[in-house]
Image (cartoon, grey):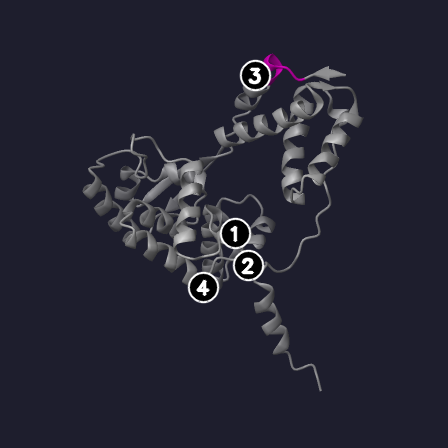
Amino acid sequence: MFLIERAELESFRAYLQERECSAATVAKYMRDVRQLAEFCGGRVEDKGTLIAFKEELQTRGYAASSVNSMLASVNCYLAFAGRIEWKLRYLKIQRTNFVCKEKELTEQEYHKLVEMARAMGDSRLAMLVQTICATGIRVSEVRAITVESLRTGQAEIRNKGRIRIILLPKRLCANLLKYCRERGISRGHVFVTRSGRPMDRSNIWKMMKRLGQLAKVGTAKVFPHNLRHLFARTYYKAYKDIVRLADILGHASVDTTRIYTIRTGKEQQRQIERLPLLL
């Protein structure tokens, strides 16, 4: 048995920071472990308590991938607490070889989002959407887009102890530098809030959801990471170079990149229909 109290949680936070986890990762792990503490009243009697928490997550309607993500947080905490033998098994997920059409953001829908942002007079949002989609960066990496990076045409991105250089399209740099001049931004972060602080995941997520509603694009497919998926599919369709694409996206494994290049079921069905195998 062990307790999950405030002091232990703060020690866990320090443990994550010492491991050089990103701020977003630290926040997520802390949030997930707090859910466990709330579920068991801060008292983990044995592994049965953890198994019950796992089952509770499934009854709440979380997707299997979301459950596994939360279990990863719990398992990390168990390692920190010296209870490795209590680690939980992840749910088995059968990988599909096509993506649901309702979740895939198309190029035409992307254009609608940009055009709507412009129609709203929100040049920041219009440029933000284009920046993520034209570079394939993660929403957490938007901070790497600075005035200085626009002048060199390169952005340095640090993630999980790795550093990669993103080459920025010349047209994007020119448009963003013009945007910065109009906004009086002479140095530092390009995308900032009204108070001058760098925009974060929460800011961007909310803005995109509202944009999707106004542009009449399914809100289930309007979120920052889907812009990254669109970049990946477009790049792969043009160059068929998955190894180079993995480098650009910052993936340690090409297997992860393959997920980004999956076609829709409808497209795969069209391909199968064209096979000359029926008499």
Where is residue 147? Give x, y as percent. 27, 39
Q: Residues within 10 Å of mark 4 (few under 14, many from 20)?
A: few
Q: Amino acid at mark 1?
A: Ala
Q: Nearer the viewer, mark 3 or mark 4?
A: 3
Q: Amino acid at mark 2?
A: Glu
- Who is closer to the viewer here, 53 or 247? 53
Where is residue 223? Give x, y as percent. 47, 48
Which labelled disc corresponds to residue 10? 3
Q: Nearer the viewer, mark 4 or mark 1?
A: 1
Majority secondary structure of magenta residues: helix
Residue found 65% across the figure and 24% down from its top = 38
Q: Which residue is mark 1?
A: 220
Q: Which residues are the magenta region?
A: 4-10
Asked if the residue under mark 2 is in contact with the one under mark 4, i.e. CB atoms within 8 Å, the reply is no
For marks 3 and 2, the one nearer the N-term is 3
Q: Which residue is mark 2?
A: 102
Asked if the residue under mark 1 is in contact with the one under mark 2, i.e. CB atoms within 8 Å, the reply is yes
Left/right placement of residue 187 relative to residue 23 reads left
| Residue 144 placement: quadrant | top left
Is label 4 in a helix, a strand or a loop?
helix
Marks 4 and 2 sit apart, C-alpha to C-alpha, by 23 Å
Is label 2 in a helix, a strand or a loop?
helix
Q: Residues within 10 Å of mark 3 (few under 14, many from 20)?
A: few
